[in-house]
Structure formats: structure tokens, C-alpha cells
Amino acid sequence: MTIRDDFTVKENAPRLLLLAFPFPPARAIGGVRCANLAKYLSRLGWQVTVVTIHPDLLADPDPTMTDMEAWFREADVMRVWTGHGLRMFLGGYLVERWWERWSVVRKAASAWVRWTGMDRGIGWIRPVMKACAHLRPGDVDIVMASGSPFASFEAAGRLGLRLRARVVLDYRDLWNMAPHHSHPLPTRIRKREQKLVNQAAHVLAVSGPMAQCLAHAFGHAEKISVITNGFDSETFRAVVPRHFDQPTVVYAGTFYPPLRVIDPVLEAIGLVNQDGLADGRQLRLLYLGPHGEAVRKAAEACAVMRWVDICGRVPRSDVYAAMKGAVAVAVITSVNRTASPEVDSILTGKLFEAMVCGAPVLLVAPEGSEAARVVTETRAGQSFVGADIEHMAAWLQQRIVGDSEAPVPDVQAYAWPEIARRVDRLLREDA
């Protein structure tokens, strides 16, 4: 454990301990939410301490964020680094010890997670408790944990009891009800989630449908509030748009087959190029992320590989530059026309990065989903169901040739300073 010693104590400020498993320089999109919560709550007068994994343990950190100490100083945020046990459960997210790299250990760990439904971040609970052992009752007013992984909720529950502090659970994703589970989690895990929700003073959800799912499953609707993801305009201010020789759609991120796949966007690009553009240009797709092989196979199946460029993981600044230079930024929640409330609740942080970059958003999402509502209300782009390839292609053609004036987006409600003010009011209600 290491603690900054150059932190300016804010007299009479409410004190927030934020357990943030994903945090810069980690590439995970969840780290963006955690960093902005810490940064903007500090500006609103909170004394914020972030508990997160030491950057040296990250297997693939963002190379453009090498000086996190400078970030914490500028944000006026305290930090506590932790270690992590049982890293083999995390699929390469952290640097693994030599014995964890054995294939037999990896296979056994993966099978154990599938069989037990255990949270992959379980190895973080003990390091968090150890790193916070110096804290005493009265040192902290609120312990907030952001999940997933949901081991952070367990750690927050334990710390809240020991420190006699209020606990706030921040749901970036659903836990037991997550739509990407291959099979239902064991009843004991659902009971554990119920106990943690019962204990919490507040529960935050990133969307209205997610809040409704939680209230239906666990009750306590009165303490469940919607705090969406958002964008930080300060991050985008210095980004220079990337120049593309051909009009390009950008997709950055991961996939969760069969719900979240790239096929509809590829088919729309193929249809645009089949009809041809008047000036002889061709529409292309640039994919940035870890699932290049899946994109390659899908592009070959759709016979559009000649119009697809695949990159691996790149610094977040490069992603933003590509987004700013794109003819459209693709975001996909589900390719199905209709979906369960759990799928409808998905409101990924990538959507808000796309909304603020300047290029229109090409959203593939179920009818009536929360993501579709946000894109429509903000005029940030257009939402399509996965089967609506022809309308998707026609919309892309309009964006390329510019024969229709795009509406001016109204996204200010999703700026992090505004979101942080809502969180600030909520946390101070019974402080």
C-alpha cells in the first residue's frame, strides 16, 4: 500500500472513499466513469480518496497515461494503491505470476468461475481491506464502490460496517441479472447481492431500465437513483481529428456474441459500396480493439473485408482522434429488434464518448431501448435495429455526401460537471 503525502486536507469537507477496480491508466471504459466521479466530486468540495490497483500490475495500461501521480495532484484527489490476488481469474487484465500463466491453472480457474458463478474480481477483496486497514471509524463518511467487478461491492460492505460509514453501490453493469451470463448465477450469489443492496444507503444505476430492474429484483426503489455515464469535454478539447483518405466508420471496443456483433454495420457498408458513391470513394470501417479476429471473420462472411481496417488496442487518445475524424461512430448494444429489460438497460460509456466527438452516432440497439432514447433526444445520431440494413446504408450515404443538414446535438445534460452535481446533491442529502 502507498499513500500520497502531498494531499491538501479540505476542512469540514465530506469524505468519500471510492473503490475503483477500473481506473486509469487501465483501458477499461469503466475507468473513465470512476475517474470523472473522483475528479468532479473533488471540485465540488469533497475530500476524495480513490482505492485502486497499482498501475504496475496492469498487463496492458494506456501508454499515454504514464504519470498518474500528476493526474491525482491536478485533480486534488488522494489515492491508495493496492495489490491483487488470484489474478488468473481476470483473463489477462493484470500481470500474472509465473504459476498463473500455466495453461492447466488458467483452464482450472476458468472452469471454476463458470461452475461457481464466482466474481472474477474476488482476489481484490483482501488487498482492499489490507490497504484500508489504517482507516478508523470517523475517517470516512461514504464508501462508494463501482461495479463490475462486484467484489468491490463486497469490500465496500465490509468497510462500511467497520468504519461505520454509509455505503453507496454504483452499478455500471447488472450483476446477477447481467444479460451476458451464459447461465443463471447460483442463488447464494443473488442473496449476497440482496444483502449488500439492503445495507447500502444509496444505489446508483446508469440507466432508468437498470434502476427498474434493480428495484423489481431487490426492492428499495426509494434509494435507487439514475446516474448516467457521460463525457468530459476537457478530455476532447486538445484532440486533433484523424485524417482519413476515404469516408470511414469507426468502431472501438468489444463484442458479446450473439447480442453485440459487428455484422449489421458491415452489411450496411457493403450495401453503400455496392451502390457506389458519386465521387468514386468507398466507405470503410476502422475497428480498434481486442477482437480483431472476430471482426475479420465477420467481414469475410459479409464479403466486405477489402473495406475493413483492423487495429488492436491503441491509446485512448488515438481512439478519440479517429472518432473525431470519422464520418460516423458505430455503437452497438444489441442487434435484436426487441430485448429484455436487462439488455434495454445497457448505456455504455462509449456512447457518450461518441456523442461528444463531433461525428454522428450510428447506434444499433433494440427499439425503445435506453440507448436509442438518449441518441434520439440529444439528436446525436440515428438509432437502427440490427435488421434495418437498408435504412442504415441510406443514412450513411447521406452523411458522406452531405445532402442533408445534420441536427445540432444537445448533449450538455451528459457532461460530467452536470452529472457530478447530481451525485453531489444525492450524497449530501443525509450527510
Image (cartoon, rainbow, N blue to C red):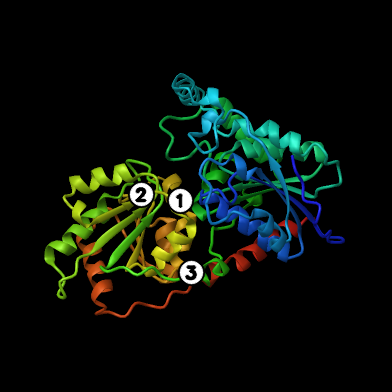
Q: Is residue 172 above or below residue 218?
A: below
The residue sitting at 45% across, 51% down in the picture is 346
Question: Of callouts 3 and 1, which one flags the residue occurring earlier in the amino acid sequence?
Answer: 3
The residue sitting at 35% across, 49% down in the picture is 334
Question: Mark 1 and mark 2: span between their CA atoms?
Answer: 9 Å
The percent position of residue 307, horizontal first and vertical second, equals 21, 57
Give the numbered dot on residue 421: none
Please name the residue that numbered disc 3 is placed on.
239
Check if mark 1's residue and mark 2's residue have beta carbons within 8 Å.
Answer: yes
Rendered image quadrant of residue 420: bottom right
Rendered image quadrant of residue 55: top right
Check disc 1 and give the amino acid type: Ile
| Closest to the observer, 419 or 9 | 9
Check disc 2 and give the amino acid type: Ser
The percent position of residue 140, horizontal first and vertical second, equals 81, 48
Check disc 3 and give the amino acid type: Val
Check if mark 3's residue and mark 2's residue have beta carbons within 8 Å.
Answer: no
| Closest to the observer, 71 or 195 | 71
Q: Is residue 403 left or right of residue 150?
A: left
Question: Mark 3 and mark 2: span between their CA atoms?
Answer: 29 Å
Q: Is residue 366 visible?
A: no
Please name the residue that numbered disc 2 is placed on.
334
Please name the residue that numbered disc 1 is placed on.
346
The residue sitting at 56% across, 44% down in the picture is 214
The extreme left residue here reads: 275
Question: Mark 3 and mark 1: span between their CA atoms?
Answer: 27 Å
